[in-house]
Image (cartoon, grey):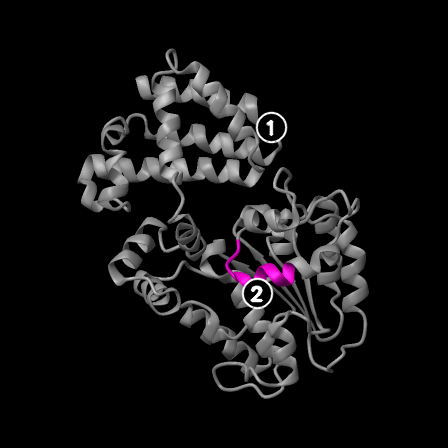
Amino acid sequence: MQFKDVVGQQEIKQLLLKMAGSGRIAHAMLFLGQTGSGTLPLAVAFAQYLNCENPLADDSCGQCTSCRQYEQLAHPDLHFVVPVNSTDEVKKPRTDDFIAQWRQSFTANPYLTLNDWYQAIGIEKKQGIIAAEESAGITHKLFLKSFTGRYKILIMWHAEKMNAATSNKLLKIIEEPPDDSVFILTTDRYDGILPTILSRTQMVKVPIPDTETLVNFLKTEKNIEVNHARSMARLAGNDISETLQLLRNDNRQEQPEQVFLSWLRMCWNISKDYKKLYSWVEEMARLSRDEQRNFLVFGISTARECLIANLAGPQHARYNEQTFAGFERFSKMITPQNIESFSKTLQEGAFHIERNANAKILFLDLSFRMHHILRM
């Protein structure tokens, strides 16, 4: 992947190019930003540039042997560590057990989300982790002699998924790195990384792209009409992954906001809709952990937009008129007096989902709590 394939991020690209040109490349870097900002594509593009045989002033050449291998994620000095979990075929999983699926998933969508990845390897019902089994492989690969004589690069996607044992072993490797090795960690959660690792990495903050950049991408690469592209970018908060998900959802009957609004209606009329609510809880429990968490995070964002619409008018909210129409009545229930309770309740739910709480009990409890908040 070349820098030109990464949506926007001109300032970050210039920073990385300047770093490479000076030869002062940190042996451990942390790309911090939402999945939809492009941390992973930037990491791969930077790695490709570092190992390009004929680098240009602003990008890798895209033609040399190294670049062609990078296009397939098959360069012998490029290594990945990503969250995985056990399957029927793999009992002690490592990234290498799923490398073919990883290459295919990234090639199809460099802005893939954790949920996209979990679906690709069949662990939707589980949470991916970066377990201690990865550590031995990392050490073995990076202490080998470089195949090309340039950099050995390891990209760890969603580094916050490391467990304690992996974090401690990685810390030792980072403290005494092999020659000509570069670690690039990506994460969207700064607080999910050990402070001792954070202190030994050079942080690169990757922002969400601006609206015009995303609109231009949708227009030129996805053939989306400008007004529709602008509406989608606004709805997704300029998050590229969310925008691509909206594109995939365009032909689906039930949108995320419809599911969320349906739940709120059941919470409001809980005494009448309790049978329907129990069925809904059963359906939510069958989703993956990340889908459950994303639903609650979406709810927090929705509450924010509803409060903005309530106080400043719908024209200031992120949602377009058609999307917001269903929330118009509900938005009047979100006030400065209950927004904190509303958001905190959903945040606590997301927190417990990440820690493997029983989904049925959690969503049923959330429903009763939301009933109380809405009826205040």
Dot 1 or dot 2, earlier in sequence:
2
Rendered location of residue 295, percent (x, y) = 46, 37
How packed mark 1 is, by other alpha carbons closer than 10 Å (few <14, some 14-19, many 20 or more), is some
> In the depicted view, which residue is nearer to us: 321 or 19?
321
- Look at the image and tell me in which quarter the N terminus lies: bottom right
Q: Is residue 107 magenta?
A: yes
Q: Which mark is residue 357?
A: 1
**Range of residues picked out in magenta:** 102-112
Q: Which numbered marker is on residue 15?
A: none
Q: Residue at x 70, y 50 (%)?
A: 167
218 shown above or below 268 = below
- Residue on which the image places disc 2: 107
Element under label 2? helix
Is 173 placed left or right of 352 in the picture? right
Query: Which residue of the protein is positioned furthest toward the top in this rendering?
Result: 271
Q: Is 45 inside the magenta-drawn segment? A: no
Q: Position of residue 163 (x, y in %)?
A: 69, 45
Q: Residue at x 61, y 47 (%)?
A: 118
Q: Is residue 24 visible?
A: no
- Reply above or below: 21 against 296: below
Amino acid at the residue labelled 2: Thr
